[in-house]
Image (cartoon, helix red, strand yellow):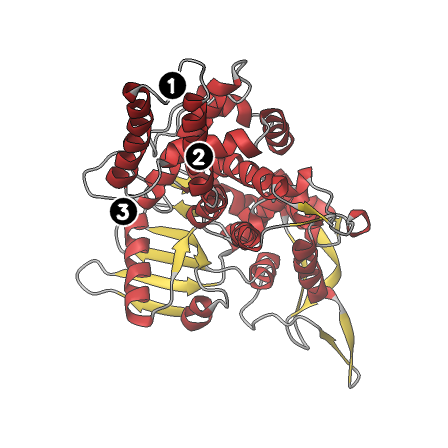
Amino acid sequence: MSEIPEVSEELITAGLRKVFRMEEGEEGNFILRDPIRIDENRAINRVTKAEISEICDRLNSAKLKSESYFQWGTEAEFSLVSLDPIGAFERYFEDKEFIGQGDNPVTFKVGKPSREFSAYLLCIFAKNPILLRAPRHRMLLNRIRSLGVEHANHGIGIARGRLSPDAQSLFDAVGESLRFTTLRITSSKARPDFEKLANSFLFHAAYNTDMAARIGLDPLFRAQAIQRVRRTQFDALEAPRKTYETDLVHHYLMGVAAEIPLLEYLAYYHIAEHYFVEVFNEDLVKQVRSSITDPSFSTRRDKDIQSIIRIVNKVQRQVKDEGGVNEQRSLKLVLDRFVKLDRLANDLDAYDASLVDYYAQSDAPFAGASKAAIREVDEEVARNAIAKRIYKVRNALVHAKEGELPKYAPFAHDDELAREIPLMRFVAEQIVIAQGKAL
C-alpha cells in the first residue's frame, strides 16, 4: 500500500495560495486578484470556505486511499501515468466513457481530475515546497497563473488560458491546467475491487489500442530529492573536468530519465555489471599469482602444480554452471575497486538521513534481501552485505517464475523498490566517476 495522503482544509488552502494570488474575504472566502475567464461573459473570481470544507470531507471519507487513488463505496478515482513519451493514451481516451453490461454495470471514464483529486494535488504542493522550485514546476505554476491574466484581443479581454465551458470552480481550473489524467470508475453497488477493475481496464485498453498507462502518481508530483544534494543552480554549474566511458554514461542517463523504478534500478545495476568479467578475471589472476609466489610453492612438486590447476578448474566449473562469472562475487569485487563506503554513507545521508539505518535494520521483503550495515566497522563484511542485497534485489526484478519466492510485483512493490534505488544509484555514480579520465 502506498503512503496514505494527508488532506486538510489548511493544506488545500495553502496549496491554492501557492499557485494563485488570493486575498481572504468575508466569512473565510478567498478572492482571486486575477479572475479566470471562462468566456466573454463568465469568470471564476473566488473559492468559498464551504467548498473547501466539502471537498476535504469528501476526500477524508474515502474507504480506501493511497497516494494515487481514492475509493468510496460505489466509486473510485485513480491517478494515471502514461507509459509512452508523448502522452498518446491521454489524448486517445480523454473524456471517453465506457459503460459495462449486466445487471450491475460499471462505468469507466478517463479525463481531467475531479475537484477532489485536484484539491489533493494542491495538498501535495503545499507539503513539498521543492516541487514548485524546480524548472518544470515553475512552468506548471506559470501555466496555472496565466489563466488569470488577460490581454487585449480586438478590444475584448480574453484570458491566455481558456477553460472548458463546463468549468465552474477554481478546482476545475486547477484540474485542467495540470494536464493530469485520472480514471474514474463508478458502480451501481458498493464493491471492494475497484483497483482490480482499474487494472482490467488498462489491460483491455493496451490490448486493443497498443497504448499503455499505469496507476500511479505522475513524477511531476514527486519531490526530486536527489536535487537537494546537488548544485542545481545554473550559476553554480561548471564545465566537466573528466571524460567518462560512453556506455556507462548512457546507462546512467537511462536511469535518471526512467519513470519506472524497475528500469531505473536495472540501468544503474548495468553500470556495475559492465566490469564484472574484468574484475572476476583479475581476481583469478590474483589467486594464481598469490599461490605461485608463496614461499611454500615449488614448481618441482606435482601437488603444488595441481593446486593451481584446481583453482582454475573450480572457477571454470562455476562459470560453466552459472552461465558466466559469479555475479555476486563480481559485484563485491567491483565495490572493492570503485566504491568508498564513507562517501556512499554520506551521499545517502544527504539524500535521506534515514536510509543508512534503514538498510542496516530492514530487509527488502520483495527480494528476500537481508540487512546491509554500510557503516559496519569491518569494511569487508559491509561490502559483502551490500553486494548481497543489491544482487538479490536485481534477481527479484529479472526473475519472476511462478511459485518462486520472493519476487517483484510490478507497481505493487514500487514503493519498496524506490527505497533501494538510492543505494544502487550512488554506487553506480562512484563507479562512473572513479573510471573517469582527467581532461
Give the residue at the far right of this rendering: 235
Task: Identify residue for label 2.
Answer: 331
Q: Is residue 92 above or below residue 293?
A: below
Mark 2: amino acid: Leu
Task: Identify residue for label 3.
Answer: 193
Q: Quadrant of residue 158?
A: bottom right
Q: Closer to the N terminus: mark 1 or mark 3?
A: 3
Q: Are marks 1 and 3 in contact (CB under 8 Å)?
A: no
Whether residue 370 is visible to the viewer of this picture, yes or no, is yes
342 or 223: nearer the eye? 342
Q: Closer to the N terminus: mark 2 or mark 3?
A: 3
Query: Residue at position x 51%, y 31% from top?
Result: 335
Can you give x and y, in whole percent of width and height, for residue 192 in the image?
Answer: 27, 44
Task: Identify residue for label 1.
Answer: 298
Can you give x and y, in whole percent of width and height, for residue 93 in the image?
Answer: 40, 69
C-alpha separation, residue under disc 2 versus residue under disc 1: 33 Å
Mark 1: amino acid: Ser
Circle 1 Cα neighbour tier, 10 Å, few/some/many (<14 / 14–19 / ≥20) = some
The reply, left or right, for residue 422 in relation to residue 298 is right
Pair 2/3: label in front: 2
228 or 222: nearer the eye? 228
Give the residue at the far front of this rendering: 300
Query: Residue at position x 38%, y 18% from top?
Result: 298
- The numbered disc on residue 156 is none
C-alpha separation, residue under disc 2 versus residue under disc 3: 42 Å
